[in-house]
Amino acid sequence: MSRMQRITTRLAPDPAEIQAQTRKWEIRCPDGHSKDLWEAGGVRYRATGSKQSYGYCSKCGRRRMLRIVKKTDP
């Protein structure tokens, strides 16, 4: 668990709900790689819309503009 996840889950009234809502989001690289946001160390609670963040892609290892988007149902 990342530092932000530990702080957020300690202060929240329902830590399981924060984790469940965050797992509905993923972080995507422009090359098409994606990773679960919770596993990447992020937190997204009661959020709407997508977000962009500059960081490293865990698959290709390059610094990129990563998109945080809600997962689509198969």
Image (cartoon, rainbow, N blue to C red):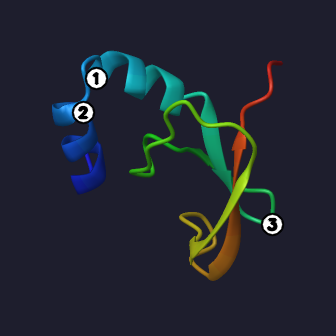
Q: Earlier in the sequence, mark 3 or mark 2?
A: 2
The residue tagged with tag 2: helix, strand or loop?
helix
| Residue 57 spot, x, y in % from top left | 59, 68
- At x 20%, y 43%, the residue is 6
Question: Above or below — where is 30 with respect to 50?
Answer: below
Q: Nearer the viewer, residue 11 or 35?
A: 11
Residues at discs 1 and 3 in contact (Cβ within 8 Å): no
Residues at discs 1 and 2 in contact (Cβ within 8 Å): yes
Q: What's the residue type where badge 1 is placed?
A: Pro
Q: Quadrant of residue 16?
A: top left
| Residue position marked by numbered label 2 in the rendering | 9
Q: Is residue 11 left or right of residue 31?
A: left
| Residue position marked by numbered label 1 in the rendering | 15
Q: Nearer the viewer, residue 59 or 52?
A: 52
| Residue position marked by numbered label 3 in the rendering | 31
Disc 1 versus disc 3: nearer the observer: 1
Q: Earlier in the sequence, mark 1 or mark 2?
A: 2
Disc marking residue 35? none
Q: What's the residue type where badge 3 is placed?
A: Asp
Work out which quarter of the rendered image holds the C terminus and state it. top right
Work out which quarter of the rendered image holds the N terminus and state it. top left
